[in-house]
Image (cartoon, grey):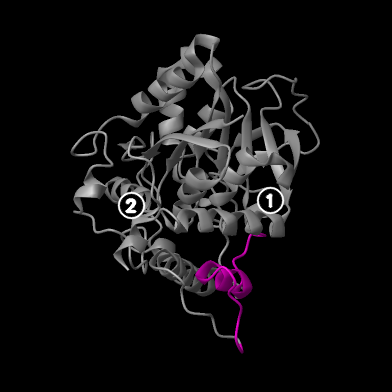
Amino acid sequence: MSKSVWLDCDPGHDDATAILLALHWPGIELFGVSTVHGNTSADNTNLNAARCLEAFGAPEHIKVHGGARKPLIRLPHHDVEIHGVGGLGGVEGLPPKDDERVLARFDHPRGHTRAIDAIARAVQRSWQDGQGTKISVVSTGPMTNIALFVSVYPELLEGVEQFVFMGGGVGVGNRSAAAEFNILCDPEAAQIVLDAPVKCVMVPLNVTHTAIVEDSIHAKILSPNGALDNGKLPPAATPLRQMLSTLITFFAEAYKAVFGFHLGPPLHDALTIAYIAQPELFTCRRFRVDVELSGKHTSGETVVDLWDYSKSDNTWGHTGKNCIVTEALDVMDFFDKLLECITRCDSVSPLNRKS
């Protein structure tokens, strides 16, 4: 049975790989994409998502819906150091921003439709008042859109299977000493989502930092049978694979310069789709998770109650053990699936028709 998915994102290099997986992992039915402030401005994330949908050969009915341009309370913050000014720094070969096929990816000619309304329509279409299937809502950026949806459409939450988000960490941060970037951008939104009466799944830094695109994987991204030759990467087999290689290369250099990752970059956001498609790839436990909102040094930290000090009940939401926290990943199996999805994408990508 296919799994209904809505993807809310802020592309972003690793968000782009999440879009690819959502389109080409068997058993995933992607209903649509919404965008949010985060890695770059909302205008850029909107265009980047549309360019990725076109490059990855998405069906024409899958549209991009622009969402929140700023956090609920705080000032917006972008991660130029990691993703470049436009969000997809260094990526070569994507369709240009003014390409008619890219602009056709927007539900509205200007791309200004409300993400929360699009999410609501997708839930209604999938759930059909209980006659259909629940939908999984994925967040790979700040959770502003998801928090607004929870607040404006509480009557639709019964049609949501789970909120799966890349964000947070258990005792680790990456954009402060304690906080991960997506949560740090809008911690109040994250808390609203965690308090909703819906299963939440957290894919934290502790897990995403194990999904490293080492050179041996990069070689296979470039060519299905690719291998390193005296440490050198093989040539790209197709324009799509060349584009993905430039994405990985820029991301790798950023992670090396900023965080000292010498083996390659982590594909944080792609793991959300992997969890929905094959949760057995992950080891998980259920905990009470809250977000620190006011700490001088810890604002945005995800506080995971490992020892159940809160004595939470077994409900989802504000009184319960509200979150499945992923703790480990079958890394090689994940990358095998990623490479399979790239091969499927390769057969339909419009980028390859230009060669």
| Circle 2 crowding by C-alpha within 10 Å: few under 14, some 14–19, many from 20 | many
| Circle 1 crowding by C-alpha within 10 Å: few under 14, some 14–19, many from 20 | some
Please tell me whether residue 208 is drawn above or below residue 133 in the rendered image: below
- Residue at far bottom of view: 230
Q: Quadrant of the C terminus?
A: bottom left
Q: Total of numbered circles in the picture? A: 2
Q: Which residue is mark 1?
A: 171
Q: Please check the rendered image and state whether residue 218 is part of the magenta-colored stretch, yes or no.
A: yes
Q: Which mark is residue 319?
A: none
Alpha carbon distance from label 1 to label 2: 32 Å
Residue type at mark 2?
Asn
Closest to the observer, 253 or 193: 253
Residue type at mark 1?
Gly
Identify the secondary structure beneath mark 1: loop
Identify the secondary structure beneath mark 2: helix
Q: Which residue is mark 2?
A: 48
Please tell me whether residue 195 is drawn above or below residue 33 in the rendered image: above
Chain part drawn in magenta: 209-230
State which quadrant residue 174 falls in.
bottom right
Between circles 1 and 2, the one closer to the viewer is: 2
